[in-house]
Structures are given as structure tokens and as C-alpha cells.
Amino acid sequence: MTFVSTLGQSLDQIERIKITQLQLASFQSQIATGKKTQTFSGLGNDVIASKRARENFAKLDNYVNNIDIADRRIKMMFSALEEIKNQAEDVLNAIEIQTQQGEYEIEAVSDLARNTADFLRDLINTRDGDRYLFGGAETVDPPLSGSGTLETYMQKQLNDWVTAAIDTDQLIASYGDSAALTDTIIGYSATLSSGSAKNVYVRVEDYTEINYTVFANHDGVRDILAGVNMLAQIDQVLDEVTLDPDDPATTITAPGATQQEQNDNFYKFFNDMAAMMNRALDAIDSELYSLSQSQAQLDKIKQSHKLDQNILQDTISEVEDADMNEVAVKLNALQIQLEASYRVTASISSLSLVNFIS
């Protein structure tokens, strides 16, 4: 039997089948991934719109991530300041009750102040991971160490006071004046003590940064530390406020030749301590308000970024996502076409001269 040469037709048909198979694979990939193509080049003229939208989306995503990190740290700082305030209020309430009763239980108040002082140090050294939050841009070293000489300093001032080496006004100045009670004595880090600490900012937009700095040596925190640590040392120096009717040889009281003078000197110092603590609490309230404002700004900007991201995501989807219904219809049609092509190819391959003539 003589066969008709159909090599040319077969090769042409095979090439058509290959093209159809590639189209079929493309449609199958679109069904599997939901995307028109797996490469940017496959988007044709839409590639620029896709790349720009993705670039802007990623940039906004970085800003949102920055905001989330800053928001977490602000919440931690806010919580720490709230607790510092609560601890200071407990000490303040204790000494105000003493004033109202006209008596002063030196040991009880000092014990409370000592316990509070230890807790305050931990709060001031609050960390987010390995990052200290109250040291400004200096995040590696703790803002408040235990290497200060605050305890010794306070005891010396009290000793000088009861021995009349300094008067009550000078005692008050010794803890209220930052030139006398320096940050180094308190135990603040070298960066804070030198005043070289930098603020902390979070970049939230191309040209916008939000400052959420609270330094550990902020006036409010500093005065609370000074007040609490001074109160913690009183029982180490004084036995009682006034001498009545104790032995003057073995009882140490506030300075004064008479009970009235002793009483007046002590409560002048004592009332100033309470007033300083109250001012410190007001100052911390101001810092809490500032943190709240920064947090509100961050939240507002974040919501704006999320809205912009949704718009960009719509653009990306419009350019890159395949229409599943349309792809399914085309895929089905292509499968039918491919099956028909296979049958035609098989027929051409088996074509003989007899079949061709008939």
C-alpha cells in the first residue's frame, strides 16, 4: 500500500498542538494561582502599573510596621509611667495621712519608700526586648543604674540637717535643686547625665516623623525618685520628730532647741516633700497626655495607610488577577480544541493513497 506524504502537514499540526498546549498550561496555571501570569513580563503594558502599585504597597507596609512597633513601645512606656505614678501616690498618701494625724511613723513610711524605690528602678528600666525605652535614642545601656550614690547622699544631707550643719531650707535645696542633686548622683546613665541623649522618632510617612520620647530623668520622674529615696533614708537618721519625753542623749530628732522648733523644721521639710511629689505627679500626667497624643496620631496615620493599601491592592488585583469564570470557559474550549487537534493529527498520520483518492 502506498502512503501519501503528509510530513509537512503533520509538522505544522504538531506545532499548532504545542502552542495550544502552552496556552492550556497557562490557563491551568491561572486556575491554580488566580494570577494572569507568574512573571512581570507576562503582564505586557500593565507591568508598570503593577510594579508601581507593589512598590507603594511595600513602602506603606514598612510604615505600618514602624507604627505597630512604636505603638507597642508607647503602650509599654505609658503603662510604666502609670505604675510610677501609682507607686508615688501610695507614698504620698502615706505621708499626707501622717500629716493629718499630727504624728509621723518614721519606720513605716521609710519601709514603704524603700520598697517603692526598688520598684521604681525596674519601671524606669523598662525594656522592649533588649531595647531600653526611657533612655532616648540610647537603648543599649539602662537609663538608671544602681551605681549612683543617692542613698549615701541623702543620708549625709539628713545627718547634716539634724546636726545643724545645714538648715531646713538647705536640706530642701539638697534634693530639690538639680545642681546639688545631680543626675550622676541619682544613678542616671552618662548619656542622660550629660544631656546628650537624643529623642526617639518613628518614621510614619515619607516626610513625617513622630516623637515619642520620655527621658528617665524627666523632671516628674526625677523628683519622684528624689522624694522617695529621701523618705527611704529618714529612719536611718531620725528616731523621732521631737524629743518627748525621750532621753536626748540617745534619741535623734529634727533640729531645734525646743519641741516646737523641731516640729516646725520637720514639717517644713515634710510638707515641701509632699508638694514636690504632687508637682511631679502633675508633670507625669503631662507626659502621659503627650504619649496619648502621639499614639492617637500614629493610629490616625495607620488607618490612612491601611486605606491606601486597600486601594493599591485593588489596582494590583485588577492588573494581575485572572477572571476565573473567563479562564474556565477558555480552558474548556481549549481542551476541546486540543482533543480535536489530536484526532486530526492521527488521521493525517494514517492517510494512504487509497484513502486520499477515495
Image (spheres, grey):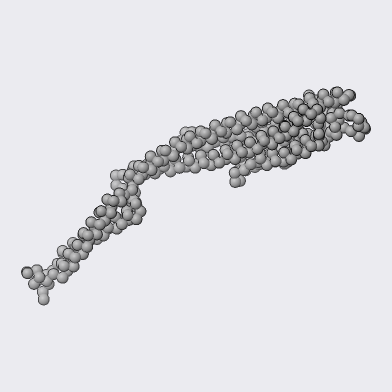
Q: Residue at x 36, y 44 (%)?
A: 316
Residue 49: x, y in percent?
Answer: 34, 42
The residue furthest bottom is 1
Please state if 226 lies on the left or on the right of 254 as rendered: left
Q: Nearer the viewer, residue 205 or 333?
A: 333
Q: Quadrant of residue 164?
A: top right
The residue furthest front is 101
The residue furthest left is 357
Say which quadrant the N terminus sits in: bottom left
Q: Is residue 333 visible?
A: yes
Q: Residue at x 28, y 54 (%)?
A: 328
Q: Nearer the viewer, residue 335 or 86?
A: 86
Residue 67: x, y in percent?
Answer: 51, 39
Say which quadrant the C terminus sits in: bottom left
Q: Is residue 182 visible?
A: no
Q: Residue at x 26, y 60 (%)?
A: 21
Residue 150: x, y in percent?
Answer: 75, 36
Q: Quadrant of residue 23?
A: bottom left
